[in-house]
Amino acid sequence: DVKVTQSSRYLVKRTGEKVFLECVQDMDHENMFWYRQDPGLGLRLIYFSYDVKMKEKGDIPEGYSVSREKKERFSLILESASTNQTSMYLCASSFRRDTNTEAFFGQGTRLTVV
Amino acid sequence: GDSVTQMEGPVTLSEEAFLTINCTYTATGYPSLFWYVQYPGEGLQLLLKATKADDKGSNKGFEATYRKETTSFHLEKGSVQVSDSAVYFCALSQGYSSASKIIFGSGTRLSIRP
């Protein structure tokens, strides 16, 4: 069974903390994505990576960075967490250039910044 | 840029009612189109897809037809069940210089009354 696993379902962090969200996939996918989900705004792409050490900004990269040191793992980093980063974060993966294939999603991490 | 627009929710229906959720898109080239579903407390999962004009995707009684002339991909089901209550996302996948990526609509929350 294919799997995308996010390290935490729920996180509570303090303003100003550095926060790491981890995502691992076991499908040998080249592409990995981080989305943010907020009510009424749908899924907004933060960053994506199409290969190890490669990354591209999505629609809302400000306040975030990413790391892809191994093909199966994609980390989202909040350098200094703020309350407006309270949200649901979803990781996904897919094959690199095949537009016909679906993306597979993790369960999501609900982050609360207090 | 490429975008997806879907009808605002929430949508509330009685069991066995007919469902339509409208989705239109703007894209250069020839994207693939998807409907994803998110059940409470879970990540997104693929419901159905269509990869070229006039294709019909279907799954679990849901259908959607890729209409290039109207740039639409409306989701339909003839008789909804309480278990169909979820958030539904329309999406497109497009190839870019580096990789394909998926763009989502804002989501439509569907509630079915017994």
Image (cartoon, coloured by chain):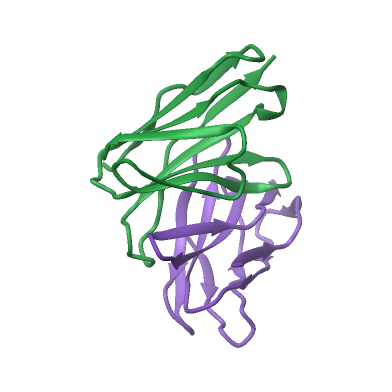
Chain colours: A green, B purple
Q: Is residue A80 left or right of residue A33?
A: right
Q: Quadrant of the N terminus of chain A?
A: top left
Residue in the picture at 64% in, 11% down = A14
Q: Name which residue lies at 65% across and 59% down.
A: B16
Q: Is residue A113 visible?
A: yes
Query: Residue A32: percent from the left, percent from the top?
Result: 38, 45
Q: Is residue A17 placed above or below B104 in the rendered structure?
A: above
Q: Is residue B114 above or below residue B64?
A: above
When asked about the image quadrant of residue B101, the answer is bottom left
Residue toward you, B8 or A97 = A97
- Which residue lies at the image location 76% right of the left edge and 50% below the top edge? B10
Q: How many marks?
A: 0
At 53% from the left edge and 51% from the top edge, which residue is drawn? B37
Front residue of A46/A100: it is A46
Image height check: is A84 above or below B21?
above
Quarter of the C terminus of chain A within the rendering: top right
Find the residue positioned furthest to the bottom: B69
Residue B41 visible from this viewpoint: no
Is residue A101 found left or right of A39 in the rendered image?
A: left
Instruction: Indicate the position of residue B34 as horizontal and vertical percent values.
Output: 49, 63
Q: Position of residue B54 (x, y in %)?
A: 48, 84
Residue A110: give x, y in percent of width and height. 57, 26
Nearest the camera: B20 or B96? Answer: B96
